[in-house]
Amino acid sequence: MKTAFILSATLAVHAAIVAHEKDIESLDRAIGDGDHYTNIKRGSEAVASMYNTLLPLPPDEVLSQIGSKLLSSIGGASGPLFASFFMGMAKFNKENHPKMTDLNANLETAAAFAYGVQTMMMRGKANVGEKTMLDVLVPVSTTFTIAAAHGKTAADICREVKNAADEGLAYTRDLIATKGRAAGLGERAIGHLDPGAKSCQVIIHVVCDLILKK
Ligand code: ADP
Ligand code: MG
């Protein structure tokens, strides 16, 4: 993972979140408290505005500072969860990057992503099937790891990962929530997509599209 790529991704993510305001906001209004769009917009804006400060830094430091900024700027349930994802990726990069020069770059990024997702799972004490963003992030991580292990090209990995994100998001529609605010709704949550899963699907798409354009 390179600093320049992480930073262009932060700009693209912020633009994509803003472009999907209606979708994201309506979902949290339906099964949450309606603030997920403002939370994630505030976080992505704060991170995008760090572009020049982060540019000279190594990737693990960039990821760690993004995590801290998300923690202080998002709030809600999702702030500490997104923060833990970036902190996990930062930790993995710092500890493993020097030892992993013989590995293919896609496999290394997949491993860092998986570590980030696991850190988030530990933080939120949640797993797949609970109608959260993990229903997108876990299958994306698995798909990424398997495709990278098969030596697929970055473009092929991106196409598979985007499909996994779409399927994960769709899967949340018929679930009952057992974590987060929607957990109190019981069966009334059925029929609605999870807002955090939607914002993660948007983020995964835009980052993959950035790679596909290269
Ligand atoms: P809040 O729930 O505090 O209003 P947000 O609206 O910003 O925070 O985020 C809600 C999203 O957070 C949910 O749609 C869900 O995807 C995600 N979420 C909530 N709890 C958890 C958890 N324990 N693990 C993973 N994701 C979670
Ligand atoms: Mg909310």
Image (spheres, rainbow, N blue to C red):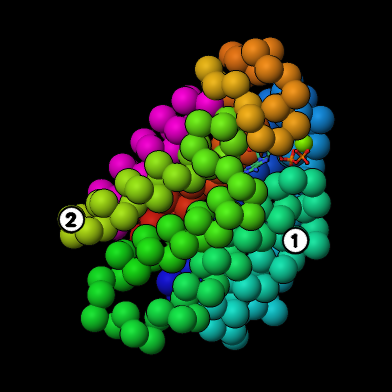
Judge whether residue 10 can be spotted in this image: no
- Residue picked out by circle 2: 150
Percent from the top left, x then y, of residue 40? 72, 47
The residue indicated by pointer 1 is 71
| Quarter assignment of residue 190 | top right
Residue 195 horizontal/vertical position (percent): 65, 32
Asked if residue 15 is positioned above or below residue 201 in the image, the reply reads below
Q: Which residues are magenta?
A: 154-172
State the residue in front, 191 or 126. 126
- Label 2 environment density (alpha carbons within 10 Å; few <14, some 14–19, many ≥20): few
Residue at coordinates 61% horizontally, 47% vertically from top-left? 125
Q: Is residue 47 above or below residue 164?
A: below
Image coords of residue 105 (percent x, y)? 31, 70
Residue type beneath disc 2: His
> Is residue 180 visible from the viewing direction of this image?
yes
The kind of secondary structure element at disc 2 is loop
Above-or-below relation of 159 to 147: above
